[in-house]
Image (cartoon, helix red, strand yellow):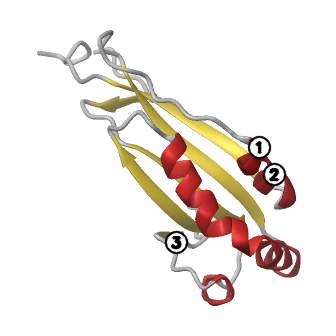
Amino acid sequence: MFEKLTYSGTECNNYLYFSFVSDFFDTEILTKELGIEPTSLMIKKDPVPKSTAWNYQVEVGNETDLETPLEKLIDIFEPKVEVINQLKLEMNLETRLQFVIEIDINPEASTPYFGLNKRTIDFLGKTDTEVDFDLYKADTIGLLSDE
């Protein structure tokens, strides 16, 4: 009835991830050089996905605090700034910090919060990383259901 592309369902599932993206690249080399196992991989195919991606995801679930998981992500990748930049240069990669945030339309629910503190901004700047936000509505009280 009111369902839109930005409607995610009846539960919030927030998460964020750090991603390496390019047309084609050897994800195994990236994993070996970083010393970190990805939580997911996408390999370019026709017609989708349109690119290859190596992702490291931190789950947040229905928690509204995204700042703590962001700090965990920075803790993992901040010591690897030089390796990240070398891999980006050698393998023609881009990096992205992706937030996937579901906002509960229940007026009683808290909205997710986070901050981009100086440490995070410094890491993003040193690695020339883009930041992207995907926002969705979650209907935990059933306002958008057909019933």
User: Label 3 belongs to which residue?
Assistant: 41
Q: Nearer the viewer, residue 140 or 44?
A: 140
Rendering coords of residue 74 (x, y %): 63, 59
- What residue sits 60% from the left and 85% below the top? 35
Q: Tag 1, which secondary structure?
A: helix
Q: Quadrant of residue 89?
A: bottom right
In the image, residue 136 above or below residue 100: above
Q: Quadrant of residue 64?
A: top left
Q: Residues within 10 Å of mark 2 (few under 14, many from 20)?
A: few
Task: State the residue lying farthest toward the left.
Answer: 147
Mark 3 or mark 1: name the one nearer the start of the chain.
Answer: 3
Q: Quadrant of the N terminus?
A: top left
User: Label 2 belongs to which residue?
Assistant: 122
Rendering coords of residue 101 (x, y %): 47, 36
Label 3 and label 1: CA atoms lie apart by: 29 Å
Rendering coords of residue 11 (x, y %): 26, 34
In the image, residue 130 above or below residue 93: above
Label 2 and label 3: CA atoms lie apart by: 26 Å
Q: Tag 3, which secondary structure?
A: strand
Q: Are marks 3 and 1 in contact (CB under 8 Å)?
A: no
Q: Are marks 2 and 1 in contact (CB under 8 Å)?
A: yes
- What residue sits 35% from the left and 42% below the top? 13
In the image, residue 138 above or below residue 83: above
User: Label 1 belongs to which residue?
Assistant: 118
Q: Nearer the viewer, residue 70 or 52?
A: 70
Going by the numbered disc 1, the residue's amino acid type is Lys
Label 2 and label 1: CA atoms lie apart by: 6 Å
Q: Which of the numbered marks, if any, corresponds to residue 99?
A: none
Mark 2 or mark 3: name the one nearer the start of the chain.
Answer: 3
Rendering coords of residue 54 (x, y %): 59, 70
- From where the camera sits, is residue 116 visible? yes
Going by the numbered disc 3, the residue's amino acid type is Leu
